[in-house]
Amino acid sequence: MISFLLRHLEASPYRRQVKAAAESVFWCAGALLRGVPGSPRCPVCSARLVCLYRPVMGDHLAREWGIDETWRTLIERREGEICLGCGSSLRVRQLAATLLDWLAARGGRAATLKAALGEDVLPSLSVAEINSCGALHGRLVRLPRLAYSEYAPESPTVAHEDLLALSYPDESFDLILHSDSLEHVPDVDRALSELYRVLKPGGASIFSVPIIRDGRQTVVRAEQHDGVVRHLRTPTYHGGSYQATRQYLVYYDFGDDFPGRVSAAGFNLREVEHAINPAAVTFIAEKPSPVAGR
């Protein structure tokens, strides 16, 4: 049932209803799977990890990316391996695992995000979630110091933030989370500069982007000047998962040079790659702390 719902979500004129039905199934399954012993456990919801699979990449996007079958399979698995307990993709679970690793260096002991919410470390931080991080969002909303925003949100109760011009004051946050957002901004270097600006020294932006690690360089697909978009390649769009029903224009296909751009923005960068899927990589971009005595 849940595989059918996910497979037909994007094509359905009743996307919101189908999404709600899928989330109800996840809620019921999660309640059961959290009581099932054994490992592995989902780092988001702590349930015994049982994955569904759905294909997510169309032939058009695969051709535009110019990827072989190996990389197509890796990306399909990154997005299409869904935790039955909470609906998190492999990408989102990798983001959660990376966050937990970062928290462990600060005294956290939790093995799942659900458990981390009950500790002292994560709730004590000022956190920005810039665009919903999939299934993580339902847990992050419990943080007392969370600033959650979307770009052009559909709900009037959600704050609008543009990664090219964040409204937050300098050095506002200990932690910034975003997932597969930077490829959708017209100027990634300016966005990285904004993230650096609003982080406190010693703080980190933990995030993911779709990236092909086969030796290629970043491809710029579109540019924007004075609000007018100029397409340099055939337009492609990402989005449309059960978590977000809208599609967004892709400005960048990131390649092996992307980490250098993050470092050039001033961050100390660490890459965390999934043990068996190099397409599921997350980045910990830390803002250096001032050197004592200077």
Image: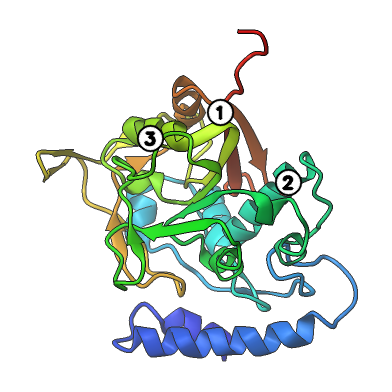
Return the residue found at the far top.
Answer: 294
Return the residue found at the far right.
Answer: 37
- Taking the spot 40% from the left edge, 50% from the top edge, the residue there is 181
Residue receiving disc 1: 287
Spatial CA span between label 3 and label 1 = 12 Å
Horizontal arrangement in the rendering, residue 256 relative to residue 117 (left or right): left
Looking at the rendered structure, the number of numbered marks drawn on it comes to: 3
Can residue 153 be seen at all in this image of the molecule?
yes
Picture coordinates of residue 101, whole percent (x, y): 74, 45
Residue toward you, 37 or 57: 37
- Taking the spot 68% from the left edge, 65% from the top edge, the residue there is 44
Query: Which numbered circle lies on residue 233?
Result: none
Answer with mark 1 or mark 2, whichever residue precedes in sequence. 2
Residue toward you, 75 or 180: 180
User: CB of mark 3 within 8 Å of CB of mark 2?
Assistant: no
Tag 2: amino acid: Leu
- Taking the spot 46% from the left edge, 66% from the top edge, the residue there is 56
User: CB of mark 3 within 8 Å of CB of mark 1?
Assistant: no
Q: Is residue 122 above or below residue 84?
A: above
Residue toward you, 168 or 259: 168
Tag 3: amino acid: Glu
Residue receiving disc 3: 194
Picture coordinates of residue 207, whole percent (x, y): 53, 46
Residue receiving disc 2: 103
Regarding mark 3 in the picture, which secondary structure is present there? helix
